[in-house]
Amino acid sequence: MLTITHSHAAGTMIDGTSKGDGTAEVLRTVGWRWGRSIGAWFVPQSRDRLPKLHTITRTQEALEAAGFEVETDIDSTRRTTAEVEAGKIERQSDRVDALAAKADRKATASDDAWTRARSALDRLPEGGEPIKVGHHSEGRHRNAITKADNAMRKSVEASVDATHAQARADAATHTTDARYRPVTVANRIDTLGAELRKLERRVIAPRYDAAQGYVDATDAQMQARADHLAPNLAEKRDQIAYWEAVRAAQIESGTATGYDRSTVKKGDRVKIRGQWREVVRANPKTVSVSTGYTWTDTAPYAEIQQHQRPE
């Protein structure tokens, strides 16, 4: 018996599979991946999200067609965005610690490999003495050269591994900071807002009638759609509320600027990406600035670092 499970914290996974039982071929065809670190199959990008019921249904049908018995255990309870973000930060912190520990192990291994390589080189005859072909020392000399070559190669490989591990550890330390960069937060709010409006349009979208073409949806149809999309709508609104609170705190602390169309006017000067530009037009979402050529550049208000009036 195979069991497809879903929870907001763990995502969509499957229990009961084993190596060589034929499930791997089926799961790959319907978009599942093998998680080496967790030792299980999972649906990508299903953690911290509502269940993808179409994927779960398609997987169940494919497995049953292949002769497997499948049941589902779906928990649609949604955690708040604040809980989701706290979990991500904690997991990232654990990942940073693990990568730092791995980098330390690789660095130690690199030092040990270099010591062994140096020791092997020291055992060679001094002054680069050539191999005495036919002499009783020929075999020993050739073996010493081979060992020295192997030791040096392993030392170089260990050094590369150590450098790569340290680079991954260094990059991981900046992941959370990058996620909470003021411009990134502002862009995320805009993206989530667009996604919310798209869901809201689906509720009131016209329906297609074979005889009349597209006609207005009835109240009953719109209510049915609203009920069906209610979890998705609630999720988007909660996400927007969380990130708007983050941005408000950043503006209050001075980490982010809060310029918009009401504060930036044509003729003002703004500093964007370290350069001062004159404002040509203040758009609803972006500001158009002069370039010194016949065209203008545009940038979101969140990228404005400083602002000056003409006077």
Image (cartoon, rainbow, N blue to C red):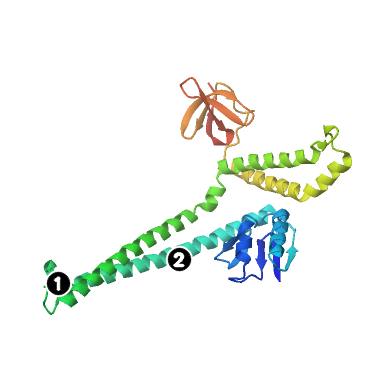
The furthest residue to the top? 294
In the rendered view, would you say 300 is above or below 68? above
In the rendered view, would you say 55 is above or below 125? above
Specify the amino acid type for callout 1: Pro
Image-quadrant location for residue 167: bottom left
Is 295 left, or right, of 21 in this rendering? left
Residue at (74% x, 42% y) in the render: 199
Residue at (68% x, 39% y) in the render: 194
The furthest residue to the front? 66
Specify the amino acid type for callout 2: Ala
The N terminus, quarter of image: bottom right
- Per the image, the residue denoted by label 1 is 125
Q: Can residue 228 be seen in this view?
A: yes
Mark number displayed over residue 101: 2
CA–CA distance between discs 1 and 2? 39 Å
Tag 2 secondary structure = helix
x and y, in percent, of residue 213 in the image = 82, 33
In the rendered view, would you say 94 is above or below 238? below
Which mark is first along the chain, 2 or 1?
2
Front disc: 1 or 2: 1
x and y, in percent, of residue 116 in the image = 28, 71
x and y, in percent, of residue 39 in the image = 58, 68
